Amino acid sequence: MARAVKQTAKKAAKGEARRPVRPLRWLLRLAFRSALVIAALLVFVVFAYRVIDPPVTWYMWAEGQRLGARVEHEWVDAEDVAPVMLRSVVAAEDANFCNHWGFDMVAIRKAIEEGGNRGASTISQQVVKNAYLWQGRNWTRKALEALITPLVEAIWSKRRILEVYLNVAEFDEGVFGVDAAARHYFGVAPADLSATQAARLAAILPDPKDRSASRPSNYVTRRAGAIRDGAATIARDGRAACFEGG
């Protein structure tokens, strides 16, 4: 009996030894596990910035190295920023901020129709680029941005997205964040910004190195006027509801 059991065990061992190796199955299993690890890591880093204020971003560090000096930057909470500043940025950069999930499909369609001359990045996308990624237009960064943006929208509040944006955006050479910008251009705290000052800061965001909020060109003055009107409009029509308040 014992001998028969041993022979059966030997045959089973030989059968296992002869089992064919399936590299495709192994690769698929490895890819699946790797995808799970990457997904878990992305969720972790996105959740972390929901409660932790981002440190110096890669671009801030790079600018500091280029300038050979420490950049101007001081974190400020959203409640310590004049509400009109939040509305002005939304009016200038992403009027449908409260109505989309990270990608403004209407703006994307218009950009395609106009041959790519029109910008379509939302505030959420810009936050992802500035807080997590790097500058540039390569496809790797774009793909990562497309993956992370919906996570940020799902995990952060709209107010938090706007708060981070205002703290990492560049407002002049070596000047980052609304606190440094308010003091740099107008000598006031961000809570004391007027509607005109807020609109001027928002007006220079697409090209902060070539525009000035304190010495505005005719173009910046006109754009700031439109932004001021737009900020008042989104306050009236409810498009500021998702980030107003606590």
Image: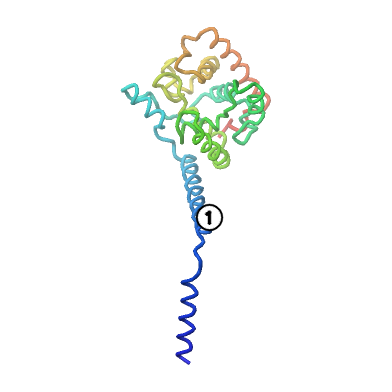
- Give neighbour class at mark 1: few <14, some 14-19, many 20+ (Cα, 10 Å): few
Residue denoted by label 1 = 28
- Locate residue 157, reporting x and y percent: 56, 38
> Looking at the picture, which amino acid does disc 1 mark?
Leu
Relative to the observer, which residue lies in front, 100 or 17? 17
Relative to the observer, which residue lies in front, 20 or 62? 20
Reply above or below: 87 against 197. Answer: below
Relative to the observer, which residue lies in front, 98 or 4? 4
Reply above or below: 2 against 13. Answer: below
Reply above or below: 36 against 104. Answer: below
- Locate residue 236, reporting x and y percent: 67, 23
Left or right for 90, reference 173: right
Q: Residue furthest right?
A: 237
Q: Secondary structure at mark 1?
A: helix
- The residue depicted at 52 percent of the width and 18 percent of the height is 198
Left or right for 116, reference 17: right
Q: Residue furthest top?
A: 218
- Locate residue 12, reporting x and y percent: 49, 78
Relative to the observer, which residue lies in front, 44 or 235? 44
- The residue depicted at 59 percent of the width and 20 percent of the height is 117
Q: Quadrant of the C terminus?
A: top right
Left or right for 184, reference 27: left
The part of the image, by quadrant, that contains residue 182 is: top left
- Locate residue 224, reporting x and y percent: 56, 14
- The residue depicted at 34 percent of the width and 23 percent of the height is 66
